[in-house]
Each structure stands twice: as C-alpha cells, then as structure tokens.
Image (tube, helix red, strand yellow):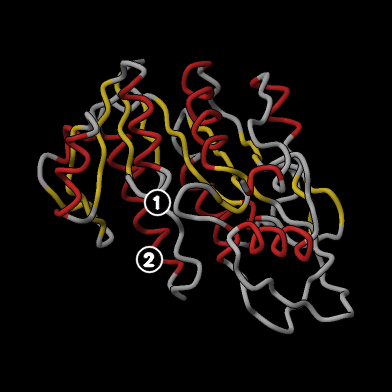
Amino acid sequence: MRTVSVLGCGWLGKPFAATLVNEGYIVYGSTTQEAKLPELTALGIKPFLITFNPHACGNDIDTFFKADVLVISIPPRTRSGQPEVYLAQLENAVQKAKAGSIRHILYISSTAVYPDLNRIVTEDDVDNESYLAKAETIVRSFASATVIRFGGLVGPDRHPGRFLAGKKDLSGKNTPVNIIHQRDCIVIMKNIIEQQVWGEVFNACADEHPTREVFYTQASVALNLEPPQFTGSDSNPYKIVSSEKVKLRLGYTFVYADPIAMLN
C-alpha cells in the first residue's frame, strides 16, 4: 500500500502528502490552481490539476485515481450556502474512485457534524440530518472507507491568536473549545493508512478543552495582540468532543494534548 492520491493539497493535504513522500510513498496530489503545480513537484508530489464542476475536470484524471488509497481533503464550504454543490462533487469523486483502482478512502470530515448537546459527544452522536453527515454517507458507500472528524484546525499559518484578537462583546466565554494541531492530524492520518484501519469513524481533538475565553485570550497574548472581550453572561450550548476511540484503536497519544501548550 505504497501509492496514495491526496485530493486537495491545501493547508492540511499538502503537508500530509509531503510527509508521505518522506516516508517513501508514491504520492499523487491535486490542486485547483495551476500556479501551485511546481510547488507540489518540488515536494516530490506528482501534481494533478483537478477541479469538480461538479464532475471531475483536468488532465490525466484516470491516473490520479489509480492508487491504493485516496485521501479526500476538500474542506466543505459550509458558508457558501450551496451544500448540494459540495455533495455532488464528493459523489463524483467517489464514483471516480470506484471506477479506478482505489482500494481504500480516507475522508477528512469535521466535528461540526455534531449538534450542541451540552455534554461529551462520541462518534455515535452525529446529527444525521446535517449535510456533513450526508457527505460521510456518500463516502461510506465505498466498500472500504474511514472517516476522521477533526476539531478546529490550528498550526502553521493558522495561529488561533488571530482568530478573535481585538473583537468585542463575544458570546460563549465558558464554551469549551475542540481544537487539534496540524501535526496531530498528519500523524493520525498516516497511522490509519499504515495500520490499515478501514471501515471506521473517528473523532480527533486535543484531550483538553479550555474555555473560549481562556484559550483565545492566551492565544492573542502569545502574539502580542489585543485579547478578545467576552460578555459577562454566558449560556451558550456546547459540546465536548471525545477522542477516546481513536486513541484506543490506533494506540495514539496526542503530540499536542493541551491546546494552551500548543500556543507557543
């Protein structure tokens, strides 16, 4: 299982693909921007220019879907107001995988699939009416697919200190955060492929869940930025995402178990 196609070499997909190259894998990587093709080549990734409108368009698409594993790392456009477009793109990607020689799919989903239940949530607490759940259902129509639901993504070029710095009258001061560092994402994804853990659904968030006020205040201070200001009262609904399953199944220990510690 040494050939991996990464659909979506963006903030997460590109460093993940580069990590696999360094581990000796043959890696195909897609981008929607022609200007990024040389960048992928420089990392040892065989680049493909692929877009979905919603059907796949690009050169040599059939070769891209001739791999052992397809990693789908296309972030859902939750703010676009057009979830049906994303679902159609995903459907076409899975159809291409079925028509090609893909043996397994690893799909990057989000903990936004869970409603705010004011308690700890596990992989069974999904809101089946959400379009993220529908996206996962499309992927899991493939014979051998694993879904990984990541929490809020932070890491290089995405420091949380910039997210809320200087903002006023924010709600949710006591709401727990569900955060994961890019490094943990990459190692977990690699472990799933190496351990051949297919047909599963996993959450992945840092073990600790500080409040929004504590976390984003310290994150802003770490960059010498103005801290955000939260309102005095707070009764916002929340969820605390449990990652116990992925830790037990993969024997995984988070590199950044404490979101506060990752700020520096």
* Contact check, label 1 and label 2, Cβ < 8 Å: no
Closest to the observer, 152 or 136: 152
Q: Is residue 33 left or right of residue 188?
A: left
Q: Label 1, label 2: how many angstroms apart (C-alpha)? A: 13 Å
Instruction: Please provide percent x and percent y for residue 178.
Output: 70, 52
> Which residue is outermost to the front?
224
Q: Is residue 47 left or right of residue 212?
A: left
Instruction: Please provide percent x and percent y for residue 98.
Output: 32, 34
Q: Quadrant of the N terminus?
A: top left
* Mark sitting earlier along the chain (1/2): 1
What residue is at 72 percent from the left and 64 percent from the top? Answer: 217
> Which structural element holds mark 1?
loop
Closest to the observer, 231 or 48: 231
Q: Amino acid at mark 1?
A: Ile
Q: Please rate how many residues cluster around mark 1, counting C-alpha atoms within 10 Å: few if below 14, some from 14 to 19, many from 20.
A: some
Q: Which residue is mark 1?
A: 74
Q: Which residue is mark 2?
A: 85
What residue is at 22 percent from the left and 29 percent from the top? Answer: 44
Work out whether 196 lies above or below 43. above
Q: Nearer the viewer, mark 1 or mark 2?
A: 1
What residue is at 52 percent from the left and 28 percent from the top? Answer: 187
Work out whether 11 lies above or below 160. above
Q: Is residue 242 left or right of residue 134?
A: right
Instruction: Please provide percent x and percent y for residue 90.
Output: 38, 51
> Which residue is outermost to the bottom?
169
What residue is at 34 percent from the left and 33 percent from the top? Answer: 17
Q: Amino acid at mark 2?
A: Val
Q: Is residue 192 left or right of residue 103?
A: right
Q: Which mark is residue 242?
A: none
Q: Please rate how many residues cluster around mark 2, counting C-alpha atoms within 10 Å: few if below 14, some from 14 to 19, many from 20.
A: some
Closest to the observer, 86 or 205: 205
Instruction: Please provide percent x and percent y for residue 251.
Output: 68, 18
